[in-house]
Amino acid sequence: VEPYEVTYREWQTLALEKNSNAVNFQTAFDLVAEHETAIYQCWQRYHANESGLPILHAFLAKYR
């Protein structure tokens, strides 16, 4: 499983290329991309028998 952040960033780029009004959605694209990356990194830590909670807490703190 690769981080979906790459996919969301590509979607964002395509949306901006096709429609200049897509800038309004940049925050949403960023949030979703960072959320997917946090989940992926947490999952990696879990499989390394480490806690992924610091990653999730950092994500939550950023968007509170």
Image (tube, rainbow, N blue to C red):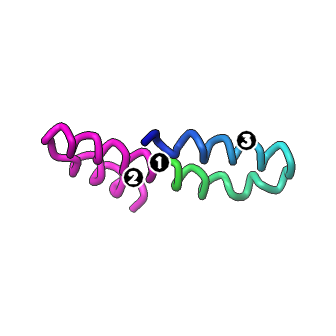
Q: What type of secondary structure mainly makes up the magenta span?
A: helix
Closer to the camera in the image, 10 or 30: 10
**Can you give x and y, in whole percent of width and height, for residue 26 in the image?**
66, 52
Query: Which quadrant would residue 45 be assigned to in this image?
Result: top left
The magenta segment: 35-64
Closer to the camera in the image, 44 or 30: 44
**Could you tell me how many numbered marks the image carries?**
3
Q: Residues within 10 Å of mark 3 (few under 14, many from 20)?
A: some
SS label for mark 2: helix
Q: Earlier in the sequence, mark 2 or mark 3?
A: 3
Q: Amino acid at mark 1?
A: Glu
Residue occupying the far front of the picture: 1
For label 1, the residue is: 34
> What's the CA distance linking mark 1 and mark 3?
16 Å
The nearer-to-camera label among 2 and 3 is: 3
SS label for mark 1: helix
Q: Are marks 2 and 1 in contact (CB under 8 Å)?
A: yes
The disc at residue 13 is 3
Q: Amino acid at mark 3?
A: Thr
> What's the CA distance linking mark 2 and mark 1?
10 Å
The disc at residue 62 is 2
SS label for mark 3: helix
Residue 40 painted magenta: yes
Q: Residue at x 77, y 54 (%)?
A: 22
Q: Earlier in the sequence, mark 1 or mark 3?
A: 3
